[in-house]
Amino acid sequence: MRILLVGASGTIGRLVYDTLRERGHDVVTVGRSSGDVRCDVTDPVQVEELWSKVGEIDAVVSTAGHVRYAPLAELTSDDFAAAFADKALAQINLVRTGLEHLAPKGSFTLISGIPSRDPVVSGAAAAAVNGAIEAFARAAAIEIAPRRINVISPSVLEESLEAFGDFFPGFEPVAGAEVARAFVKSVEGAATGQILALP
Ligand SMILES: NC(=O)c1ccc[n+]([C@@H]2O[C@H](COP(=O)([O-])OP(=O)(O)OC[C@H]3O[C@@H](n4cnc5c(N)ncnc54)[C@H](OP(=O)(O)O)[C@@H]3O)[C@@H](O)[C@H]2O)c1
């Protein structure tokens, strides 16, 4: 398959890239300052340019998006707006504008994260944004068939424990290889409208 991978240089993106390549896929990588095609997916103009550069795609995989972790009393309206724009709206717009560039039985696989189903202190913005992505995917799935859409929702990765582990006390981390495997399940399988929660 020809797969567009947004965020391929990141912690999750690198693992997903290696796994998809090992499985024989042609992977077009995207990032703001990295990848085969440079594109800030929060910018609709750059996203339109992205589609015109890449042509038809069999699968769109997103492993990007930043959300601020801080106590609710310190999170501002701007923090919530920025988190929503960077992670939720950017991925929603990738789907909305990508539909016409996706093969008839192609798929979207988005990224969310565990705080939407298992809250953590300082994770209110992450919970809200991840929940929005998951709700969107369930709703989009019933309109885009036979194209498909799923969301991967991991706990903190073993590979990210040093950076984020303190926000997830007592949580079971997930191996990056398992997260990459979930992306393969979404891309190569037949599921749609699913939230693939890990572990
Ligand atoms: N790491 C974890 O433990 C974990 C667990 C659960 C969920 N998640 C979620 O998974 C996603 C990725 O996490 P990560 O730890 O892999 O992040 P990361 O290491 O910071 O990587 C982010 C990647 O996305 C790209 N990117 C960021 N903003 C972009 C934009 N506006 N347009 C295009 N590309 C963009 C970056 O490349 P450029 O800098 O070149 O743009 C980079 O390749 C996040 O949404 C995070 O919340 C992570």
Image: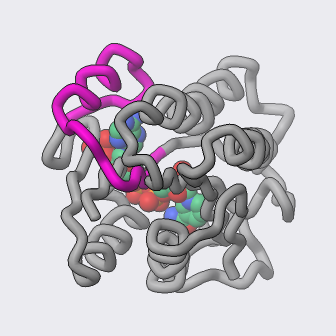
Residue at 14% across / 47% down in the picture? Answer: 36
Vertical side of 47 occupied by 88: above or below: below
Q: Quadrant of the C terminus?
A: bottom right
Judge by depth and name the residue closer to the eye, 49 or 107: 107
Determine if the magenta segment contains residue 45.
yes
Residue at 25% across / 30% down in the picture? Answer: 50
Residue at 51% across / 31% down in the picture? Answer: 90
Q: Position of residue 6 (x, y in %)?
A: 35, 48
Q: Position of residue 195 (x, y in %)?
A: 72, 63
Confirm whether residue 149 shows in the render: yes
Judge by depth and name the residue closer to the eye, 58 or 158: 58
In this rendering, position of residue 60 left or right of residue 156: left
Q: Position of residue 158 (x, y in %)?
A: 53, 81
Residue at 68% across / 69% down in the picture? Answer: 196
Vertical side of 120 occupied by 126: above or below: above
Q: Quadrant of the N terminus?
A: bottom left
Q: Position of residue 137 (x, y in %)?
A: 69, 46
Determine if the magenta segment contains residue 2.
no
Q: Which residues are magenta?
A: 38-64
Confirm whether residue 63 shows in the render: no
In this rendering, position of residue 57 left or right of residue 95: left
